[in-house]
Amino acid sequence: MNCGIDKNGIVTFKHGVFSLENKKVKAMDKKVLVIEHSYEAPVEKVWEAITNKDLLRCWYFEVSDFQAEVGFKFQFYGENDGTKYLHKCTIVEVEPKTKISYTWGYDGYIGQSLVVFELFSEDKNKTRLKLTHSGLDTFLSHPDFSQANFNDGWHNILGKSLRNFLEMDSFTKDIHIDANLKDIWDIVLAPNNKWGDAFGEGAFVETDWKEGSSIIWRDTENNIGAIGIVEVHQPEKYLKLHYYDELKPRPNTMLGNYYEKLRIASDKDGFTLSVEIGKIAKSDVTFHQEMWDNALNIIKRLAEKE
């Protein structure tokens, strides 16, 4: 998965860091930050994003571990203007698919606050998230803990990072190829040790390309990277591949969001090969575009050489 985390496993956002010794926030707390964002995603998917440790690492922070259970403790590093802070948190409230609250503390500093995530289903595929961060006035006068930094940080995390992770997008790419149609299509159906390397050196596919047949991508160690079916194959014209969300789908598992459509059409000087890729997380679009640019260029070079 492509998760925007640096080589040290640290996600950087311009915001403060937090601490809370007890469940309750004092009544005298004056600074409360409330931020709301709506996402084109079902509430189940948003809940999974904010409670699954593997998904949290893709849009939030590199958490050490995470379980949506009262009393569970977790920690992570955050960075602000080159200074790293170790956050230590304890979950204090859980209402599945509705609400999760946890303390947010950090080593070496005085202060206490509470972070609350609340989810509201607005439609089958639309969810509103309300974040309440209270106790900000307990962080005294440390410049990294200003309310402005907290506000900027949460808007960045929820309005950009989480949105790009949750919401899906698609894209198209095309390339002109001055070659014989059969040669082009033969190369499209022979990615191994050729254009398949654009998705990882040595990546190879197993399929007979017949409609309804399975298609399995593996790496050099024979690990499965993707598995799906050939939905449509119109020789020398159109190919649609549709993949499962799971690498080991059980019988009767429905196909997932991700698909690949390859089309070829004549133009005035040869042929245009186009690909449509979707649906993928918005945060992954650029990464996939770069790989497909590389793949199409390899196909063009090989076909024109033929």
Image: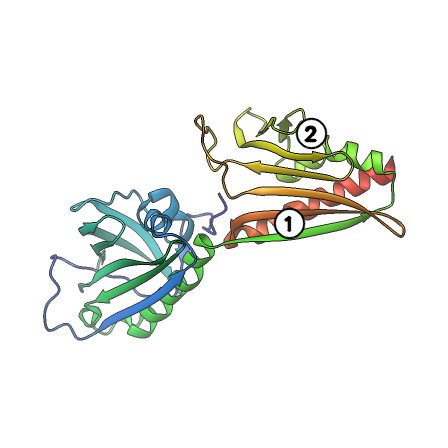
Sort mark 2 into few (<14), some (14-19) or many (20+) by Cα contacts within 10 Å. Answer: some
Q: Residue at x 37, y 59 (%)?
A: 79
Secondary structure beneath label 1: helix
What residue is at 29 percent from the left and 73 percent from the top? Answer: 147
- Percent across and percent down for residue 78 are 35, 56
* Alpha carbon distance from label 2 to label 1: 19 Å
**84 shown above or below 140:** above
Residue 232 shows in the view:
yes
Chosen colour scheme: rainbow
What is the crowding at mark 1: few (fewer than 14 residues within 10 Å), some, or many (at least 20)?
few
Residue at 52% from the left image edge and 27% from the top image edge: 223
Q: Amino acid at mark 1?
A: Glu
Q: What residue is shown with label 1?
A: 290
Position of 304 with respect to 197 (left or right) is right
The residue closer to the viewer here, 60 or 241, is: 241
54 is higher (above) or lower (below) than 201 = below
Residue closer to the observer: 95 or 100: 95
Q: Provide residue 126's location: percent of width, then percent of height.
A: 39, 58
Q: Is residue 74 above or below residue 251?
A: below
> What percent of the width, then of the height, locates residue 87?
27, 54
Q: Exactly how many numbered labels are in the figure?
A: 2
Q: Secondary structure at mark 2?
A: loop
Relative to 26, residue 51 above or below = above
Q: Residue flagged by tag 2: what amino acid is it?
A: Asn
**To which quarter of the image does residue 103 belong?**
bottom left
Mark 2 and mark 1 lie on one chain; the one further toward the N terminus is 2
Residue 259: where, in percent of width, then height?
Answer: 58, 42
Q: Which residue is mark 2?
A: 192
